[in-house]
Amino acid sequence: MLLALLAAASACEPSLLSRFASPSVPPLALTVLSATAENAGGTYVGAQVTMASRSPPAAWTRVLEHPELQDDWHPKALGTERVERIEGTDFYQRTGISVLGFTIRRQIIARVHWITTTAERMQSCWYAGEPAAFAARVAAYEEGSTWQEHGYGGWTISGQPGGGSLVEYQVWVESRGIPSPLVSWGVKRTLPTLLDAFEVHVAELQAGAVVSPSR
């Protein structure tokens, strides 16, 4: 998804993030694709969401390049239990997704790694950071949930001739003993909610309906 530029980015995993084709025009409706791949001795489940957005790339870039505009909007429908900006573009996030009566909790240090930004196109990726580096800071709220130590994701926002953007997001999660079909089902179920909520958040910021934090 992140095309050739991703191959030069050591912080992200190019063989995973390039498995989904990047469409040239927005789909008629929000589209979700999924895949499973072996990587570095582990089984990863990936999903890609593509959608049309009325907001221009600059509006998306404004949010994606400024973490302080992201840590107050995560929809509860995703099972998000806590989001904390630790330092710079390092985030702590804990989720608890209920599946068939069981709640699967995961926590992750997501480290954002920017690829490239232009007026009409923005590409970025994130990867799972090393939890030990922030152990002291997150000890107060990690609650013993299982760490997701391996994972990757990325955004591609492309301007469209008629205005608006083609928005792509994908994520790859190591299954870590959970059956891949179950992980795939959970990811595919939550990502549309993520994109829909993020679209509303970006549009509100663009319209000035939300006052950006001063920090």
Image (cartoon, rainbow, N blue to C red):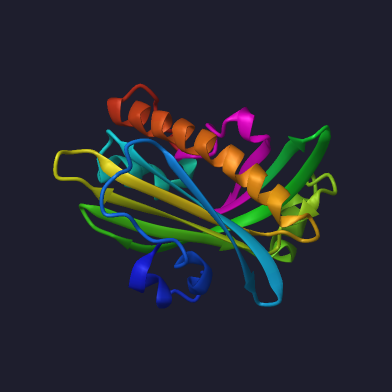
88 lies left or right of 117: right
Nearest the viewer among 49 and 132 is: 49
Residue 165: image x %, image y %?
A: 27, 43
The structure residue drawn at horizontal position 78% and vertical position 47%, both measured from the top left corner, is 142
Residue 14, given in percent of the width and then of the height, sits at: 48, 72
Front residue of this view, candidates 173 and 188 = 188
Can the viewer see residue 11? no
Q: Is residue 47 magenta?
A: no
State which quadrant residue 59 falls in.
top left
Horizontal arrangement in the rendering, residue 179 relative to residue 59 (left or right): right
Q: Residue at x 62, y 29 (%)?
A: 77
Does residue 194 appear to the left or right of 183 in the view shown?
left
Residue at image coords 65%, 56%: 109
Q: Is residue 136 above or below residue 76?
A: below
What is the residue that sits farthest to the left in this orientation?
A: 161
Please determine whether, in this image, residue 176 is positioned above or below residue 168: below
Up/down of 171 relative to 72, above or below:
below
Residue 32 place in picture, x, y as percent:
48, 45
Magenta residues, start to end: 69-92
Q: Residue furthest top?
A: 209
Q: Position of residue 201 (x, y in %)?
A: 42, 30
In-front residue for pair 212/143: 143
Residue 31 located left or right of residue 151: left
Q: Is residue 83 magenta?
A: yes
Which residue is located at x 72 percent, y 38 percent? 97
